Image (cartoon, rainbow, N blue to C red):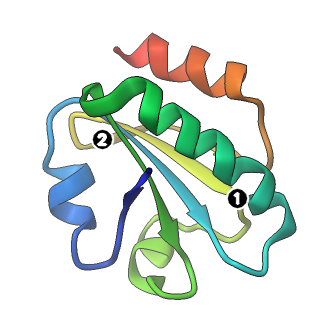
Amino acid sequence: MAFEFTDQNFQSAALQSSGVSVVDFWAEWCGPCRLVSPIIDELSKEYGENVTIGKLNVDNNPQVSMQFGVRSIPTILFIKNGEVVDKHVGTTTKASLKQKIDSLL
């Protein structure tokens, strides 16, 4: 299961951690988010502890969403060693996400 990012844990779980984090900004009412969600879950299982892969519900956690200017969802942030190194807005494929993650490892 994917990690659950929140306003409370985002700093320590994504920005202060070494390594790679992938954060999917989503909401329950978002149709395209439902397409990306199972891909995030699969990647979380595949990469295990090597990469922190998770989701942040924008309705329940507005601070982080505002901090990173997330205006459309799904938005996926790629973070390496505490710095946002890439961003993807909209739906995507598992292969595309894997390629991006692998390029950061």
Disc 1 residue crowd, few under 14, some 14–19, many 20+, Cα 10 Å: many
Residue 69 at x, y percent in the picture: 55, 68
Along the horizontal axis of the image, is 97 left or right of 101? right
Given the current orientation, which residue lies at the most extreme right position?
31
Q: Is residue 33 above or below residue 49?
A: below
Give amino acid for label 1.
Pro
The residue depicted at 72 percent of the width and 49 percent of the height is 36
Q: How many marks?
A: 2
Q: Is residue 24 above or below residue 88?
A: below
How far is disc 1 from disc 2 in space, using C-alphas?
Answer: 20 Å
The residue depicted at 14 percent of the width and 59 percent of the height is 12
Residue 100 at x, y percent in the picture: 55, 21
The residue carrying mark 2 is 83
Q: Is residue 80 above or below residue 75?
A: above
Residue 38 at x, y percent in the picture: 67, 47
- Closer to the chain start, of discs 1 and 2, is 1
The residue carrying mark 1 is 74
Q: Are marks 1 and 2 in contact (CB under 8 Å)?
A: no
Along the horizontal axis of the image, is 20 left or right of 66? left
Disc 2 residue crowd, few under 14, some 14–19, many 20+, Cα 10 Å: some
Q: Is residue 87 visible?
A: no
Give amino acid for label 2.
Glu
The residue depicted at 80 percent of the width and 46 percent of the height is 91
Q: Is residue 3 visible?
A: yes
Rendered-image quadrant of the C terminus: top left
The residue depicted at 27 percent of the width and 25 percent of the height is 50
Along the horizontal axis of the image, is 2 left or right of 12? right
- Secondary element at tag 2: strand
Along the horizontal axis of the image, is 18 left or right of 72? left
